[in-house]
Image: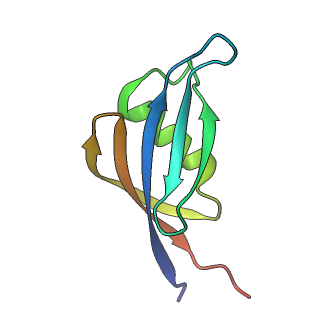
Amino acid sequence: MNDTTWTAYRTGYVPASDTSGAKILVMNLETNHGSHSAFDYEVGGGVAQHLHAVFQRAHGTIVRVERCGQWKDGYYFAVEKMEEEV
């Protein structure tokens, strides 16, 4: 039987500036570490864009992702991943 773990993430939209394009900030709430994903215009906007960014930044084998809520700039997601063997 494979064990899984859950990790909480918060996403936030970062608008384009004069020097860079729009991004989605994906913050791991357990480690308090965040990283940016470029806004992918082929995905569209809204929840799909934020979910796409989570899949790009949540390292490991993802089993499932649940949206848990939202805030003014984005969403909260719970990500279930396979535990990595040591």
Residue 30 x/y as whole percent: 48, 69
Q: Is residue 19 above or below residue 78?
A: above
Q: Is residue 9 above or below residue 4?
A: above
Residue 10 x/y as whole percent: 42, 50
Q: Is residue 49 above or below residue 67?
A: above
Residue at figure coordinates x 53%, y 34% from the top left: 24
Q: How many marks?
A: 0
Left or right placement of residue 39 versus residue 67 in this view: right
Residue at figure coordinates x 27%, y 41% from the top left: 71
Residue at figure coordinates x 52%, y 46% from the top left: 26
Between 85 and 18, the one lying in front of the other is 18
Between 46 and 3, the one lying in front of the other is 46
Residue at figure coordinates x 51%, y 52% from the top left: 27
Residue 41 x/y as whole percent: 55, 18
Query: Image quadrant of residue 64?
Result: bottom left
Residue 38 x/y as whole percent: 63, 29
Between 81 and 39, the one lying in front of the other is 39
Q: Quadrant of the C terminus?
A: bottom right
Left or right placement of residue 38 versus residue 44 in this view: right
Give the image's coloring scheme: rainbow
Residue found farthest to the front: 18
Q: Is residue 42 above or below residue 30?
A: above
Residue found farthest to the right: 86
